[in-house]
Amino acid sequence: NEYIALASRPQGTPQMENFSFNKAELGNPEEGQLLVKTLYVSVDPYMRGRMKDAKSYAAPFQVGEPITGGSVGKVLSSKHPDYQEGDIIAGGWGWQRYAIVDGKGQRKVDPELAPITTALGVLGMTGLTAYYGTLRIGNPQPGETMVVSGAGGAVGMIAGQIGKIKGARVVGISGSDEKNRYLKEELGFDEVINYKTDQPIREALQKACPDGIDVYFENVGGDITDAVIEQLNRNARIPLCGQISLYNQENPELGPRILPALLTRTVLLKGFLVGDYADENVQALQELGQWVREGKLKYKENIVEGFDRIPEAFLGLFTGENLGKQLVKVAEE
Ligand code: NDP
């Protein structure tokens, strides 16, 4: 069986040499276990954090061990009563062509309901993250202005659309005109900003948000966020979802001290992890599914083909190669 391991811990931006391709005997499933063939894997920015040897909410990857992460596969044989050969499941076994997994902790995917890839995107962790951040923390109201950073990516694109569903005026920030065109023309974002070319971003924001900003769905951190914070309205809310611009910095630079602005404008800033709301997942996935079926929520997947290209797809997250959810197709069903 082929798997991809962490070969060394990255310093700064991860490189191909931080990954190694390996082979090992797989063995046979025992009582309660399943043998699965990987069909798709998800590559995600949070995996960068797991490449560090630091304590966090998810345990660090170990050098030499297979990299684990969101994956969808087909059950080839089952020793668990809830699963049978041919079932499609989503789980977290990750960057391996085949895997033996515990039946417990997997989620059955119904291919009749939606394409199976959506279990890793809009109807999986990505969609749930956007849903909880927007609705449980951001709480956009009709007529309010909601700004989304990382808006051309997986989570940001969905968060912005949920803002639109709730009646907010939504402004997306991404690093490419192609992404911005898609946000505006296909997804109905009201305004878009390209943080690479619309400089200074402070002025671009002022133009796009003449009434100030009420909700900031925060995915990136850094200069973009500093500029947004200056323009927050009284009682604004910030779902703090991610800080991708800082993940590869060995010594994070210090930005402006933002707390006075948050104090005087009585802003709510709340970090959250998608898992915090796991008790609500069934209901949240139902609502997301409903929106998708009604055509109110569109999703976009950026699928590269080939097991060998998983590391490349992961590295592409940090250079913005993906429009929407980045997935890798590993095998045919
Ligand atoms: P994306 O699909 O958004 O991919 C990452 C995108 O980030 C890239 O496409 C790129 O787009 C942008 N980006 C990369 N580097 C920078 C930079 N230096 N400055 C600004 N933008 C940058 O990934 P996800 O949707 O999966 O994740 C988005 C965020 O949400 C991440 O920060 C992630 O860590 C976080 N997250 C948090 C979760 C939680 O539970 N709190 C769960 C899941 C994700 P561009 O072309 O615009 O530069």
Image: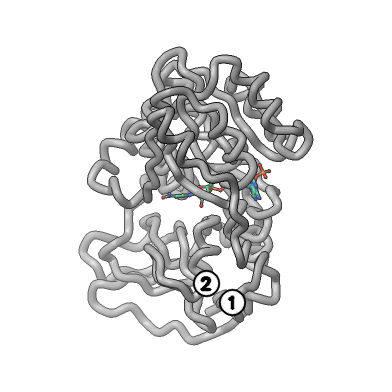
Question: Which amino acid is tagged 2?
Answer: Lys
Q: Do the residues labelled 1 and 2 touch (CB within 8 Å)?
A: yes
Disc 1/disc 2 C-alpha distance (Å): 6 Å
| N-term-proximal mark, 1 vs 2 | 1
Q: Where is residue 136 in the image (x, y as percent from the top left)?
A: 32, 34
Q: Residue furthest top?
A: 143
**Under 8 Å from ligand 1: the CB of mark 1?**
no
Image point (53%, 79%), residue name = 1
139 or 64: which is nearer to us?
A: 139
Q: Nearer the viewer, residue 176 or 73?
A: 176
Q: Disc number at residue 52?
A: 2
Mark 2 Cα shell of 10 Å, populated few (<14), some (14-19), many (≥20):
some
Which residue occupies the foreground of this view, 241 or 189?
241
x%, y% of residue 35?
38, 71
Q: Is residue 96 visible?
A: no
Q: Which mark is residue 287?
A: none
- The reply to whether residue 174 is in sight is yes
User: Which amino acid does the dot numbered 1 rest on?
Assistant: Arg
- Residue that label 1 marks: 9
**SS category of the residue bearing label 2:** loop
User: Residue 203 at what x, y percent from top left?
Assistant: 70, 26
Q: Is residue 217 left or right of residue 256?
A: left
Q: Residue at x 53, y 71 (%)?
A: 51
In this rendering, the count of numbered labels is 2
Point out residue 73 in the picture as x, y percentages from the top left corner: 45, 60
